[in-house]
């Protein structure tokens, strides 16, 4: 059993990705951090996560651009591995950090409702790919 911390301590079983854990096709693409709370500039940063259709991911996180630099604990600044979704959890199997998950939700940009975003552990990532609004 693995435990992770969000607002409360949560425990559950994590399993490596298999054929019965397909990726969420609507999340496939590149997502980059955009600070939609403290700025109206709406400029994506170079902190990006690319979720591939084959279940792999690549991520580059520049913590200096994140309002909560530690909001993605245990996630290295650059990483790759496997990903899948179950419910409102985004699971990962990191090549360097092992298995884990984060709470996520799909939202539309607060000032541009036709632009989809994902919020991962409270951090907003805007699409850098071709996605329609949720």
Image: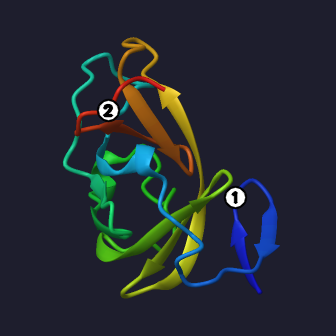
Q: Is residue 98 above or below residue 28?
A: below
Left or right relative to 80: residue 9: right
Q: Which residue is drawn at 30% across and 69% down?
A: 77
Tag 2 residue: 131
Q: In this view, does 100 lie above or below 49?
A: below
Report the quarter where the N terminus lies.
Answer: bottom right
Mark number for residue 105? none
Q: Judging from the image, what secondary structure is the residue with disc 1 in?
A: loop
Tell me residue 48's x, y (percent).
Answer: 27, 53
Q: Judging from the image, what secondary structure is the residue with disc 2 in?
A: loop
Quarter of image, res 94: bottom left
31 vs 130, nearest the viewer: 130
121 vs 49, nearest the viewer: 49
Callout 1 crowding tier (Cα within 10 Å): few <14, some 14–19, many ≥20: few
Q: Earlier in the sequence, mark 1 or mark 2?
A: 1
Callout 2 crowding tier (Cα within 10 Å): few <14, some 14–19, many ≥20: some
Q: Residue at x 42, y 14 (%)?
A: 113
Tell me residue 121's x, y (percent).
Answer: 56, 51
Q: Point out the frontmost of discs 1 and 2.
A: 2
Q: Which residue is drawn at 23% across and 39% down?
A: 129
Tag 1 residue: 6
70 vs 3, nearest the viewer: 3
Q: Is residue 36 above or below residue 9?
A: above
């Amino acid at each position: 059993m693995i435990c992770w911390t969000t607002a409360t301590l949560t425990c559950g079983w994590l399993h490596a990705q298999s054929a019965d854990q397909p990726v969420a096709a609507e999340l496939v693409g590149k997502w980059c951090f955009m600070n939609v709370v403290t700025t109206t500039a709406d400029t994506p940063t170079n902190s990006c996560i690319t979720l591939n259709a084959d279940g792999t991911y690549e991520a580059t996180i520049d913590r200096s651009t994140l309002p909560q630099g530690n909001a993605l604990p245990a996630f290295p600044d650059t990483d790759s591995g496997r990903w899948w979704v179950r419910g409102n959890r985004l699971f990962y199997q990191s090549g360097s950090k092992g298995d884990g998950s984060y709470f996520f939700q799909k939202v539309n940009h607060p000032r541009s409702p036709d632009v989809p975003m994902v919020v991962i552990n409270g951090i907003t990532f805007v699409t850098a790919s071709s996605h329609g609004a949720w």
